[in-house]
Image (cartoon, rainbow, N blue to C red):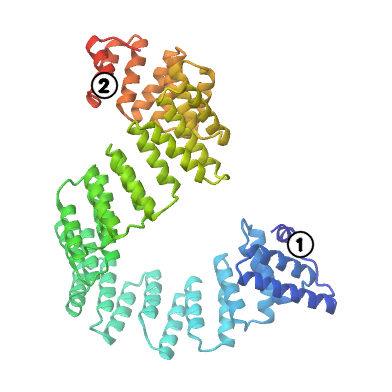
Amino acid sequence: MLALSAVAGKNEPAKKTVSLADQRKAEYIFLQAQNEKMKSNYDAFYELMAHAHEIDPNNTAISFYMGMCLVRMNNTTKERCERGLALMKEHFEAQPEDLYETTFYSDANMQLGHPEEALRAIKLLNEHNPNRLELQMRLAEAYSRSGDYAQSNATYDSIAAIFGDNIQLTAGKINNYQAMQDSAGALNEMRGLLYKAPKSADYNITLSNLFQHYGYTDSAFYYLDRAQEYEPDNGYIYLVRADYYNQLGDSVGYEQQIYNALTAEQLDVDSKLGVLLDYIRQQLAREDTTQRINDLFTVLIQQHPHEASIHQLYSEYLYARGDVKGAIEQLGYSLDVNPTDASGWRNMVILNMIDDNYAEAIKASEKALEYNPGNLDLMGYVAGCYHQMKEYDKAIETYVNTLALTDSADVEKQSELYCGMGDTYSEMKDSVKTVECYEKALELDALNSGALNNYAYYLAQRAQDLDRAERMAALAVKDQPDNANFIDTYAWVYFAKKDYNMALLYIKSAVEKDEDNHLLEHYGDILWFNDQKDEAVEQWTKALEKDPDNELLQRKVKDKTYYE
């Protein structure tokens, strides 16, 4: 790429006399370049092409591919693209009959804003290669993109006369008529094709869509009915009809057609899932809380009980609605069908953790590891679950085992694991190992925001090295400015430094993002030291409602005073 950049930055020298030996040398390097291109070694291809072109700039084939390099290279400029086109043009003028090179030259001109030159190239190529369907089609498209829609349609007619009519030709002509704002021409073109095959459901659907595009709803439904008459089991027709009803604002008709589509046997599962996903998005946007989506999933599952993707989508929907247990159940069915799905197992573990069912999360992780041995993320989740279950020795053991399997070059993963160990040792009241692990985490990855935050909070809780804690908390918030827990840590560091005004500023920001009971308790504590005692009790009360077994909060609310 350096060689190419150097060449690309120069003005091309005038034609020079090249010795026969240099011509052969350049051709040999050119062949080497082509071999590298075949092996997808594009950097080597570019470098060799630049070398070959430097040796023999008179070889138009080499010039062409040098031009291709300039057009295609990463971070190319307008000037390089124009120089590339000029180099390709040399070969085009010398050998316009070359199929690949002239086609590419035409396409490049079209893409770079030279439709007239693109059209000239493809016309000349057609003259040298008459009656080739793909070139005739390119010519018609080139006329269209040049704005000569009439000539484009004439070319499509010539193609039809030689090769026969088809929907692709008709679609091209319809696009031209639409560009000319000739609705009658577009409709007549499709009618002409339908006349030749009146019982074609696809042609009837296409004409129906065209009528719908122009606002002729009755005609659109007429041809859609004809399509359904000829192919009554064609599930796609229900989708088209549903879209029509949706455009008309007829929710009842729309939902009926959605149901028909999902129960149509000939509509494939992926299409059905696409339909259902669009429908779910609309209903969620409307905050629809009815049973209708669950009913549609039931219908789909009855039809396709062993399709993992249906259960997976149902799980995602239930989670979005806040039904974590239902989401776990459906994901379980999906994993029964597809037990090697690593991402599915990961989601199963996370869902159980969200549900505070850490024992089940560990079971899911262990099952997942049977199918995905050595998956470090899953092992990390197991350690986290043991931590939450207060089985700290098992958590540490799992972290150590996971670290032993981690690639020594993967410092981010190692840092993450050491941070987890630090959290666990903190709960075990082992201050020496806690600090050792946090320090190791930051030694491996100084920008590990989780380690920065947790270490800062650990120091703030103990009122130790608070200036460093402030710097670490600031870095964590800078990395994740919307993370309420990180902002809470920053507030708590200021609280530990007895800067209660700054603490209040940040804790308010944290609570605006998340009203977790832990944050609400901190909010109350900070309000208390800002001499806003009634407001403090109010926040403690809100926190207690979320965590009614918290004895310290019970005392704060009951006695209306702050306790360490």
Q: Which mark is residue 11?
A: 1
Residue in the foreground of this view, choosing between 456 and 143: 456
**Number of numbered callouts drawn:** 2
Percent from the top left, x then y, of residue 357? 27, 39
Name above or below for residue 48 compared with residue 59: above
Please identify the quadrant where the N terminus is shown. bottom right
At x 66%, y 73%, the residue is: 34
Three-letter code for the amino acid on which mark 1 is drawn:
Asn
Percent from the top left, x then y, of residue 479? 49, 34
Residue in the foreground of this view, choosing between 366 and 105: 366
Query: How far separated are the C-alphas under marks 1 and 2?
Result: 77 Å
Whether residue 142 appears in this view of the structure is yes
Name above or below for residue 345 compared with residue 546: below
Q: In this view, does 362 lie to the left or right of 462?
A: left
Three-letter code for the amino acid on which mark 2 is drawn:
Asn
Q: In this view, does 262 lie to the left or right of 139?
A: left
Q: Residue 257 carries which label?
A: none
Query: Which quarter of the picture shows residue 392?
Result: top left
* Label 2: element kind: loop
Please identify the quadrant where the C terminus is shown. top left
Q: How crowded is mark 1: few (under 14 residues within 10 Å), some or many (20 or more)?
A: few
Residue in the foreground of this view, choosing between 494 and 288: 494
At x 27%, y 85%, the residue is: 197
Percent from the top left, x then y, of residue 69? 65, 65
Q: Mark 1 against mark 2, which lies toward the viewer?
A: 2
Name above or below for residue 6 compared with residue 521: below
Q: Mark 2 points at which residue?
A: 550
